[in-house]
Amino acid sequence: MIDVSYLYCGKASASVPHRYGEKVSCPECDKDETYPVSRAASLRRPIVVWNITKTCNLRCRHCYTDSGAGSYAGELRTEEALKVIEDLAFFEVPAVLFSGGEPLLRKDLFGLADSARARGIRTILSTNGSLISSEVAEKIRSAGFSYVGVSLDGLAAAHDRFRGVGGAFDQTLSGIRRLIAVGQKTGLRLTMTDSTMDQVDVIFDLIEKEGIRRVCFYHLVPSGRGKEIFCVKPGRIREKVDLIFERTETLLRKGYPVEVLTVDHHADGPYLYLKLKGKGDPRAEEVYRHLAWNGGGANSSGVGIACIDAEGDVHPDQFWSHYSLGSVRERKFGEIWSNPDEPLLEKLRHRRDFIRGRCEACRFFEACGGSLRVRAEIATGDVWASDPACYLTDEEIGL
């Protein structure tokens, strides 16, 4: 994640210590659980994205789990999932993000979340928002979720088309309003594709209108059903990243306390640095040090991010479903994650030795880390090729 509101505009949040290794003070930090500061980003325990079910009431065009209606055989039973939570706590995982499919369709979700919280694990919910009645909103708040991320990919026509179900926008917006009404920390998530990129501007309008304080803009990773979507042209990505920077700055100058992040494209960090440097911003070099401490992709997949799928297989991240590191049905999560003989994990953790092409030669490697290796593999068949979504010019990266 690239914290635009902090790096570009200087607004701190409770997640800054985890992302950039720096203690901060801010109004939100007094109320929120603040992540501890790690000695090095490479030493952090992973945040686990747990796709607890493949069942979903929508059929989104970009779904990396290729989820849909109906039940799926082989998903972890409740007693198995509770054992996994014990293992995650023993391994000192800081947070679990419950995702799907649609996690609210799993009947034991709140029991699993309670178990995680009782063991000191921070819990996050990733949902399409369409099933959140007033009663469900209160259950989510009472369960102690630190944050609820709700997918919203534009206004009504764009969102419904992308999500594959008519009326989804109205249901999701109602769910968001109910979460806010009960005091649950809630934010939006938009995945930038050719059919949703033009919604970035209106999403900023919507968050201000609705009193939403957090928004994440995800770059497309064409995995699962998302392989049917062509990657956005780099030049167009750059235009929208510019817009995200501009709208964030405008909202914060107006005094609206928004937290804005971009996700799944670590080149956004060096680009943000170049924008600050071009403006003569005195914070530019400090921001670059934060980016270098974080390490971008080098400390993400296989290091700071892990995924457990509905059947219990562990992956380097949620987009790497075609590569299993092992099953939590057979070994503890910590044993799988710490296995020194797992070839992909070891290479991801020493990726500097293997990356080729523009990424290998890039002067910003320490801040970007070669971005997403799985996107390179999906596009080229080569894990170590350059990330095809990079929009930085040869001149900017030092070629």
Image (cartoon, rainbow, N blue to C red):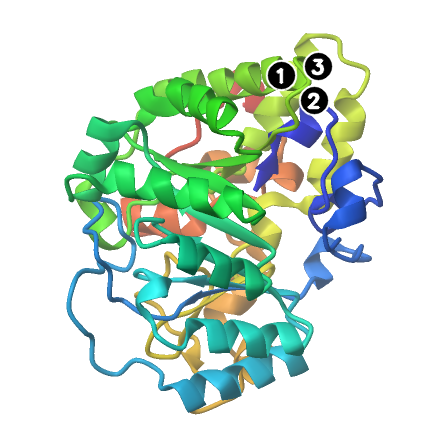
**What element does badge 2 sit on?**
loop
Label 2, label 1: how far apart the Cα atoms are: 6 Å
Could you tell me which residue is drawn at 53 percent across and 87 percent down?
Answer: 332
Residue 20 location (% of width, % of height): 74, 44
The amino acid beneath tag 2 is Cys
Crowding at dot 1, Cα within 10 Å, few <14 / some 14-19 / many 20+, comes out as many
Could you tell me which residue is drawn at 39 percent across and 79 percent down?
Answer: 312
Residue 279 location (% of width, % of height): 69, 8
Q: Quadrant of the N terminus?
A: top right
Please name the residue that numbered disc 1 is placed on.
249
As drawn, is 399 to the left or to the right of 320?
Answer: right
| Contact flag, marks 2 and 1 (Cβ < 8 Å) | yes
N-term-proximal mark, 3 vs 1: 1
**What element does badge 3 sit on?**
helix
Crowding at dot 3, Cα within 10 Å, few <14 / some 14-19 / many 20+, comes out as some
User: Is residue 242 visible to the viewer in this orientation of the structure?
Assistant: yes
Q: Quadrant of the C terminus?
A: top right
Which dot marks residue 275?
none
Which dot marks residue 9?
2
Q: Between tags 3 and 1, which lies in front?
A: 1
Find residue 296 and report its image quarter.
top right
The amino acid beneath tag 1 is Glu
Label 3, label 2: how far apart the Cα atoms are: 13 Å
N-term-proximal mark, 3 vs 2: 2
In the picture shown, does residue 313 fall above or below 344?
below
Please name the residue that numbered disc 3 is placed on.
277
